Image: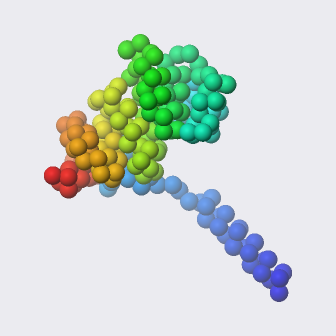
Amino acid sequence: MSRALAAAGWSYVALCGLILASHREIPRDIPRGGEPPHPAAPYGGDAGSWFAQIKPFCNAVEVEVQQQRTPAPSDASGAGYSAACYALAGKIDRARAVIDSLPTRLRPQAAGIVFNVGHPVADAGDDASAGPIMRLVVEYTPENYMALYHAGISEYQLGQYDYARTHLERFLELYQPEDGWRANAQEVLGRIR
């Protein structure tokens, strides 16, 4: 009887493996009406390669030690990926300090990298993490309508209605297509008001 149970167990594991291999991940918060207007870019260049190696350590426990051991490249992209790593770890003030260390004209570029790295966090529905990351992005790129949208939705989910209202109203000013993104923002604003 134990062989029959073992065979059944391994069959179940194989079936689960097939299901997982064929599963296509769909972001949770894409409203009806299409794909997100700003798809996240893959990591590129020397700084992107650095980030790909350090990303597993972008957590609150390991981020400082790993970035001291293996510093990011010393350019705007390196600063952007370094800030993104700190942001993923929940160290928003540290991420802001990295961006602020750049000349003013390069800060939006670094914030764009933080957005590209943080966008999947927002799409996955991690509101507690996504809201602060997207607010950071908006500080340096106030016209990034997707950052405004994600910040607003995250803030709404977390009960931060004043922030949500501000970000979603600005999103609606910048983003004009009548689609699911806009309809969702209007619906959430209606609930806040």
46 relative to 30, above or below: above
Asked whether, in this view, residue 39 is left or right of residue 43, the answer is left
Residue 131 in sight in this render: yes
Looking at the image, what colour scheme do you see?
A: rainbow
Q: Which quarter of the rendering shows the N terminus?
A: bottom right
2 relative to 42, above or below: below
Q: Residue 173's spot in the image, x, y percent?
A: 19, 37
Which residue corresponds to the image point at 41% horizontal and 17% vertical from the top-left?
106
Residue at the extreme top of the image, as rendered:
103
Q: Residue 25's spot in the image, x, y percent?
A: 51, 55
Residue 172 in sight in this render: no
Residue 116 is drawn in which quadrant?
A: top left
Q: Please state which of residues 119 and 60 is positioned toward the viewer in this rendering.
A: 60
Which residue corresponds to the image point at 47% horizontal and 28% vertical from the top-left?
95
Q: Please state which of residues 178 and 141 is positioned toward the viewer in this rendering.
A: 141
Asked whether, in this view, residue 180 is left or right of residue 127, the answer is left
Q: Please state which of residues 192 and 27 is positioned toward the viewer in this rendering.
A: 192
Q: Please state which of residues 35 and 94 is positioned toward the viewer in this rendering.
A: 94
